[in-house]
Amino acid sequence: MNPYAKLTFSLSLMLGTTITVSSSHWMSAWAGLEINTLAIIPLISKSHHPRAIEAPIKYFLVQAAASTLLLFSSMINAWHTGQWDITQLSHPTSSLLLTTAIAMKLGLVPFHFWFP
């Protein structure tokens, strides 16, 4: 992999993490997570082995499903509370879906089937 491309993807990972950690709105947190997802896929698939292509596909599909759950959780929360603020998470269904989405994104135990 080109060193400049590797540097760009690494900087994108740091940017996405910074955006996610410093966000107070659901959409900016989601945007930071998506920047991380799109930056890590080329880093995972840099070797040309069939297993190296399978891992990013699994990663992308699970991360896309988790992002969908995260957005759905934020919509349910905004529908019930009337606010898009992250700190106003009070509806139980929204909390459960958010916990599931974060567990999928982190690869925690019941959702670790994609973890390379």
Image: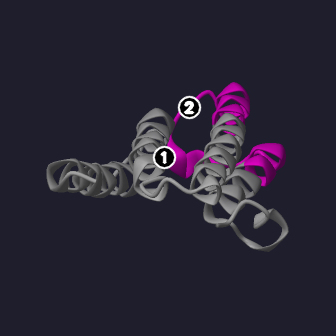
Report x, y in % for residue 77. 69, 36
Q: Farthest residue to the front: give it.
A: 49
Q: Closer to the camera, 50 or 3?
A: 50
* Residue at 34%, 49% in the rendered image: 16
* Residue 9 placement, left or right of 23: left
1 vs 2, front mark: 1
Q: Which mark is residue 50?
A: none
- Tell me where residue 18 sits by quadrant: bottom left
Vertical arrangement, residue 89 with respect to residue 83, above or below: below
The part of the chain drawn in magenta is 71-97
Residue 32: image quadrant is top left
Helix, strand or loop for the magenta stretch, by majority? helix
Residue of label 1: 37
Q: Nearer the viewer, residue 89 or 23?
A: 23
Tell me which amino acid carries mark 1. Answer: Thr
Which quarter of the rendered picture does the C terminus lie within?
Answer: bottom right
Looking at the image, tell me whether mark 1 or mark 2 is earlier in sequence order.
1
Badge 1 marks a residue whose secondary structure is helix
Q: Quadrant of residue 64?
A: top right
Residue beneath disc 2: 83
- Residue at x 53% of width, y 33% of height: 84
Q: Is residue 85 magenta?
A: yes
Q: Residues within 10 Å of mark 2 (few under 14, many from 20)?
A: some
Q: Residues within 10 Å of mark 1 (few under 14, many from 20)?
A: many
In the rendering, at what x and y percent does residue 19 appear?
Answer: 32, 48
Q: Please provide percent x and percent y for residue 97.
A: 77, 47
Q: Residue at x 47, y 33 (%)?
A: 27
The three-letter code of the residue at mark 2 reads Gln
Distance from the alpha carbon under mark 1 to that under mark 2: 26 Å
Q: Percent position (x, y) of residue 74?
A: 64, 36
Q: Locate residue 93 relative to residue 84 in the image: left or right.
A: right
